[in-house]
Image (spheres, rainbow, N blue to C red):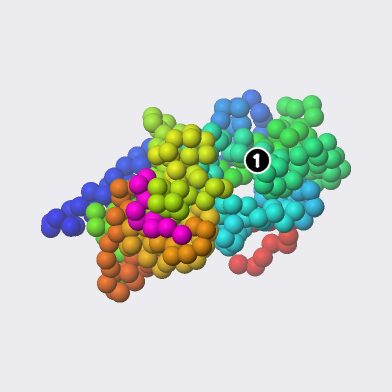
Amino acid sequence: MNRPRLKLTLLVLLAVACLSVTVTGGRAYPAAQSGGTPYQWNLPPGFPLPRVPADNPMTQEKVELGRHLFYERRLSVTGAFSCASCHQQELAFTDGQPVAIGATGQRHPRNSMSLVNVAYSPVLTWANPNLRTLERQALVPMFNENPIELGLAGREAEVLARLRADARYQRLFPAAFPADADPFTVSNITKALAAFQRTLISGRSPYDRYRYGGDPSAVSESVKRGEALFFSERLECFHCHNGLNFSSVLDYSGLFSRQIEYHNNGLYNIDGQGAYPPDNTGLYEFTGRPQDMGRFKAPTLRNIALTAPYMHDGSIATLDEVLDHYAAGGRTIHDGPYAGVGSENPYKSGFVRGFELTPEERADVLSFLHSLTDWEFIRDPRFSDPHKPAKTP
């Protein structure tokens, strides 16, 4: 075996090592003290069980309630927005916008992050190290006031009254929380939403069928060449996008040490000393440490072809332009308030060093990234809007 092939094999084996705690697709967690039907996981081959909080065990009834609430527009101040407004299934649970727009029309500083495989993420959102559970994170879009997302601050009683009056929820809430004398609570809303989001697991792309399913015909030769480039020291992509979720954060049931990393990829360098736009400073916002300026979580690359535009602020429109950014070792902005040479950012990751690609190699890398699209996941009716008639496949 020659050295490049050996290196690629070792790198892929390292990625597979993240799947070492495996289960059968139908395994279920016990419903514990909450009652209900234990949720049957339909996991892709080799995927481990997600870590689930002890106080919010997975049940079929809770997931179904969470699915209804995820698409429920009455969970917004205007009655016109829902979680799904910014997280659309056909776009891998993103919204196709540079930055999210809340229920009142307020533009947010951040791009809507994909919810694909969020069950395996030990930290949530682009750069908040303090949001560790989906239950807690659900409170942010519901009640945050700067920026306003769903706009429910001060309207808790009103929201619960709306749900309590609905015949469908009069059935779903007691079924999901049978031990509660009054199941209509904000806490139960967040638990149900979290349970549903943990089911959004994607791992049946053509690349998965090829690499982990043993089907060499599942992808083209171009994809295979692109994979070799992606996992090469020449491009360095795999350092920040690795493991089962092609990200640098990972957690699952039984994992001893949770993987949590943030990176500065040289997107900005406003003052020549590493500054990022004031509403998008990344981890620095929480730590105040200069070296954390511009450090964000590396998002999953699963279904990446569907989640444009890219970066934490949606400032890069296409995957081709993403390759331009990394090939240059950072982005140069020639004029305007954010002008600067990102490749010279002093806090930039050492893995963002720049590279050259022939037109054929560029096409191969893009083919590899497109092979990560899981069409079964995108079209899975279990994740669709239950308030609308089912679509014919």
Quadrant occupied by the N terminus: bottom left
Residue 239 is situated, as x and y percent measured from the top left of the image, at 32, 48
Residue in view at x 69 percent, y 62 percent? 390
Furthest-left residue in view? 2
Q: Nearer the viewer, residue 373 or 133?
A: 133
Residue 225 is situated, as x and y percent measured from the top left of the image, at 27, 65
Q: Nearer the viewer, residue 58 or 96?
A: 96
Q: Is residue 344 magenta?
A: yes
Quarter of the rendering containing residue 224 = bottom left
Residue 108 is situated, as x and y percent measured from the top left of the image, at 63, 52
- Locate residue 307 relative to residue 269 in the image: left or right: right
**Residue annotated with mark 1:** 140
Quarter of the rendering containing residue 253 = top left
Q: Is residue 224 visible?
A: no
Residue in view at x 35 percent, y 56 percent? 343
Quadrant occupied by the C terminus: bottom right
Q: Is residue 364 above or below residue 200?
A: below
Q: Is residue 189 above or below residue 95?
A: above
Q: Which residues are magenta?
A: 339-348
- Locate residue 272 relative to residue 134 in the image: left or right: left
Quarter of the rendering containing residue 133 = top right
Residue in view at x 52 percent, y 58 percent? 337
Q: Is residue 384 magenta?
A: no
Q: How many labels, in total?
A: 1
Q: Nearer the viewer, residue 236 or 218?
A: 236
Residue in view at x 62 percent, y 36 percent? 135
Q: Is residue 388 visible?
A: yes
SS state under label 1: helix
Q: Amino acid at mark 1?
A: Val
Assess disc 1: are there few (<14), some (14-19) or many (≥20) residues with their C-alpha within 10 Å of its C-alpha: some
Residue 102 is situated, as x and y percent measured from the top left of the image, at 69, 53
